[in-house]
Amino acid sequence: MAATNIGMMDPAYFVGRTELLAWINSTLQLNISRVEEAAPGAIQCQLMDVVHPGMVPMHKVNFDAKTEYEMIQNYKVLQDVFNKLKITKHIEVNKLIKGRPLDNLEFMQWMKRYCDSVNGSPNSNYNPLERREACKGGKETGRRAAATHGAAKTSSTASKTQSATQTRKNEQHANAVSKSSKPASNRDPVYDEQITELKLFVDSLEKERDFYFAKLRDIEILCQFPQMEHLPIVAAIQRILYAANDNPSVMAEAQAMISQQPNQEALSLSPISESLEEERPKTESQKRKNISTLEVDMAANSTLSPRQRLSDISDVHHSGSPLVNYCTTLVANSEA
């Protein structure tokens, strides 16, 4: 699926905690108030059960996990489900079970993105309370959630009555204060100027953030092109983009990914080296030819007459040489 490998610059990783908590509580009928409460891993297992009914063995899920060993067992169940569905998302179990807010937030943001991509509309036939009864500690979790929802309804009814009375009191108090207050403002204009400058500064920072986010997103999309995704430089860029923290070793790893590529092909295909290899046998052959010609000339000088030697020289060498023409004239003059 497309959501199994979403990048760190995907809009899914900018979903706030409030929206995440509301989604988890409404989908599973829970009442968690912090994202870190999902650290034991049982919530993630049931979210996968929502989008893939029957795929998660809920009897192996422990909603009452307290120790790290029990939490790891939940993540083993989740990893088995990922393997069956061929989901390549890496689960940082050691970080999640420690309840780190940022790690759990990012993982739950990915879970929401995945669940939305698989099942855009919630499954109306899914009963989270009934499914949790098969889990260890699931019944107690369901009772606490039901009690909290009942108390919330009762408190909401009482709060409506109290709010109406309180609203009338506030209105009366506001009217009394407005009558006694002075129309002029006593706020220092220096503070107003500083507030305005801070607002402008925040606006500029947000524009700069959006600008660089758009640039990084464009780079990520470009790196996902089929013509480029297998290049070593693209792999190095993705290593930097998807780094979860600001670690200096990430840059070193990216540089190593580029430097480890073999350069022997470039060396073997170098036109200079090829030309050198081609010229070497030609030079050796020319040397051997010159030596053979010299030996033949020496033998001919010892046995032939001057006129015969001159005829042979004309056959072997090109006749247009000035030196040969000069020698021919000398021999002709001496014989005459």
Image (cartoon, rainbow, N blue to C red):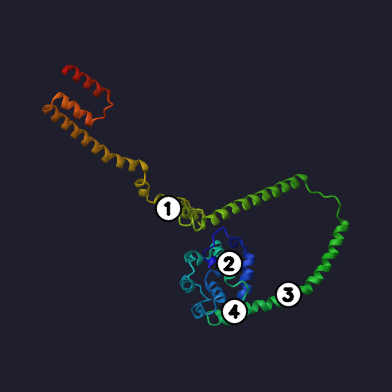
Q: Amino acid at mark 4?
A: Pro
Q: Quadrant of residue 48?
A: bottom right
Alpha-carbon distance for marks 3 and 4? 24 Å
Q: Which of the two marks, 3 or 2, is nearer to us in this view?
A: 2
In this rendering, the answer to whether 45 lies above or below 302 is below
Earlier along the polypeptide chain: callout 3 or callout 4?
A: 4
Give the labeled residue for mark 3: 156
Query: At which x and y percent is residue 179?
Result: 88, 58
Give the labeled residue for mark 1: 257
Give the labeled residue for mark 2: 113
Task: Judge from the rendering whether residue 21 lies leftward or rightward of residue 5; answer left or right.
Answer: right
Q: Amino acid at mark 2?
A: Arg
Give the labeled residue for mark 4: 128
Q: Nearer the viewer, residue 149 or 5?
A: 5
In this rendering, the answer to whether 137 lies above or below 277 is below
Q: Which of the two marks, 3 or 1, is nearer to us in this view?
A: 1
Q: Which of the two marks, 4 or 2, is nearer to us in this view?
A: 2
Query: At which x and y percent is residue 127?
Result: 60, 81
Q: Residue furthest left?
A: 303
